[in-house]
Amino acid sequence: MKEIGMRFGMSGNILQGRERIYMRILVVSDTHRDQYSLEQAVLRQPKAEVVIHLGDGADEAEMVKAKFPEKTFFTGSWQL
């Protein structure tokens, strides 16, 4: 999605003609073998280009990933 328009700079001045690019990201977690609900979440957010799955349920996330090849998936459990 692209939007051409005005925005405010750091100094408060209006900058005209700047292109803004947006990306929608869907974040889900802990689906616990509920593949259907995960698929529904992806279907309900058709503009999401990236799906990030956190926590338990990486197996079903991999299965859903195969059904939506146009989306970029990141799956697994990470600890910082």
Image: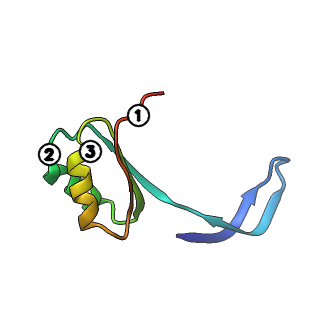
Name the amino acid type tagged 2.
Answer: Asp
CA distance separating discs 3 and 1: 11 Å
Q: Residue at x 23, y 41 (%)?
A: 57
Name the amino acid type tagged 1.
Answer: Trp
The answer to whether mark 3 and mark 2 are in CB contact below 8 A is no
Q: Residue at x 42, y 58 (%)?
A: 50
Q: 10 or 63: which is nearer to us?
A: 63
Name the amino acid type tagged 3.
Answer: Ala
Q: Residue at x 20, y 50 (%)?
A: 60
Tell me: residue 78, above or below residue 3. above
* Mark 1: few/some/many CA within 10 Å (<14, 14-19, 20+): few
Q: Which image quarter: residue 64? A: bottom left
Q: Position of residue 71 (x, y in %)?
A: 38, 64
**Labels 3 and 2: the sequence-earlier one:** 2
- Pointer 1 residue: 78
CA distance separating discs 3 and 2: 11 Å
* Mark 2: few/some/many CA within 10 Å (<14, 14-19, 20+): few
Q: 46 or 74: which is nearer to us?
A: 74
On residue 45, which mark appears?
none
The answer to whether mark 1 and mark 2 are in CB contact below 8 A is no
CA distance separating discs 1 and 2: 20 Å
On residue 34, which mark appears?
2
Q: Position of residue 79 (x, y in %)?
A: 43, 28
Foreground mark, 3 or 2? 3
Q: Report the label total.
A: 3
Foreground mark, 1 or 2? 1
The local secondary structure at tag 2 comes to: loop
- Pointer 3 residue: 58
